[in-house]
Amino acid sequence: MYRNFRIVPNIIFGRGCFNQLDQILDKRRTSQNDRVMFVLDEVFKGRPLEGRLPVRGRDMILHVNVDDEPKTSYIDELTARIKDASGLPAAVVGIGGGSAMDIAKAVSLMLTNPGSSADYQGWDLIENPAVYHIAVPTLSGTGAEVSRTAILTGPEKKLGINSDYTLYDQMVLDPELVAGAPKEQWFYTGMDCYIHDVESLQGTYINEFSRAFGEKSLELCHQVFLEDHEDHADKLMMASYFGGMSIAYSQVGACHALSYGLSYVLGIHHGIGCCIAFDYLDEIYPEGVETFRKMMDRHQITLPRDLTRGLPEEKMELMVTTALNLVPLWENCLGPDWQNLMTRDRAMDLYKKM
Ligand code: NAD
Ligand code: ZN
């Protein structure tokens, strides 16, 4: 069976296109009572970008904290706050990196679906369409702007709300917005994209659709991280989009599976977690890892080490279980025989090196 998948229907791209957000929102404002909810990464509080938001009438800005990756409890709290304050908004705009974009996705879904966001962690559990939602990335790499998931850490698991309704209705891709990102963060989130490409292209699920997007994204990543280009921000923004499109029709692999374990047990964020894991995956992705190390050298990035030293046995076991539960990722990476190739012992050895 082939997957019949939905994509984000409206895209605006280019330097300064953020200024057109007002016009885009105008179409959603059908009555005077309609309000827009801006879900803004609180890093922008009081910064020029906040002043540029096209806030009208009864609109609200919801500053969101992304010190921790989004939790289901936080989504439930934000959803309740919006419902109390205003009822259903006409549109939700998520402005920030993958975390703020995922928060906005999850909130726009939970405004129209009853219960807790934890009830919907999984595949196609959402029943009602979301509030119209718009992505405005301020970091490039995760592909959250194009994906059909909002990744959440819940009481029992780290798993996305995967559904066609999760997808954004519109994305506003303005490369100028990533300008202020700290260099390390820019690198880690950019590597998320690079690793999406490597894992998609090297995986057993690869097909011409995913290859077409993955190869272009990889080429752009090479230009961004190994060459000098004035328009590197434009390139990385498109790489993120294409990388997201590539994995949408294939899958990620070993690195993402291992990074989920790091994240669930140690709270390590996605981008840096992927970098930490990838650095130990020479056996699986030899060329990809060699190039990754060149990119790290060129940008003078050093990764934290010895993260698992002294960790209690049960935490190590939980990390292995978390990673190995991600069956499609391993199957994509190593094929149907993956369980014989990636045993618990081998996964444990990899974690012990980190
Ligand atoms: P992030 O959103 O967690 O942000 C990282 C840091 O950068 C934060 O401190 C943030 O405040 C700051 N920041 C963001 N933009 C900035 C800017 N322009 N200037 C200065 N600071 C800025 O980082 P990320 O790597 O983009 O996203 C990681 C998150 O995305 C994780 O929660 C992960 O689970 C999620 N994710 C989602 C998908 C998906 O398909 N939905 C895919 C991969 C990752
Ligand atoms: Zn990723």
Image (spheres, rainbow, N blue to C red):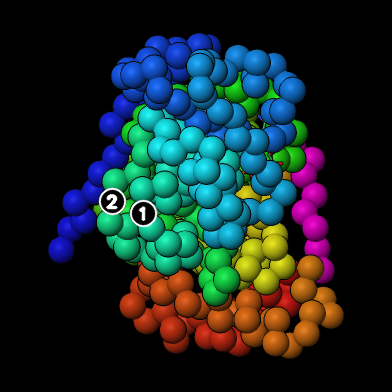
Q: Which residue is mark 1?
A: 113
In the figure, is residue 82 to the left or right of 147?
right
Instruction: Choose between 286 and 239: the one closer to the eye.
Output: 239
Residue depicted at x 74% and y 23%: 46
Question: Residue 12 in the image: x percent, y percent?
Answer: 39, 20
Residue depicted at x 31% and y 19%: 30
Q: Which residues are magenta?
A: 298-306
Is any part of residue 281 visible from this angle?
A: no
Question: Residue 91 in the image: x percent, y percent?
Answer: 41, 31
In the displayed orientation, state which residue is furthest to the right: 310
Dominant secondary-structure state across the stretch colored magenta = loop
Is any part of residue 122 visible from this angle?
A: yes
Residue depicted at x 51% and y 22%: 58
Q: Mark number for residue 152?
A: none
Q: Amino acid at mark 2?
A: Asn
Asked if the residues shown at circle 2 and circle 1 are in contact, with their CB atoms under 8 angstroms apart, the answer is yes
Distance in Å between CA atoms under marks 2 and 1: 6 Å
Query: Which secondary structure, mark 1?
Result: loop
Query: Which secondary structure, mark 2?
Result: loop
Labels 2 and 1: the sequence-earlier one: 1
In the figure, is residue 57 to the left or right of 246?
right
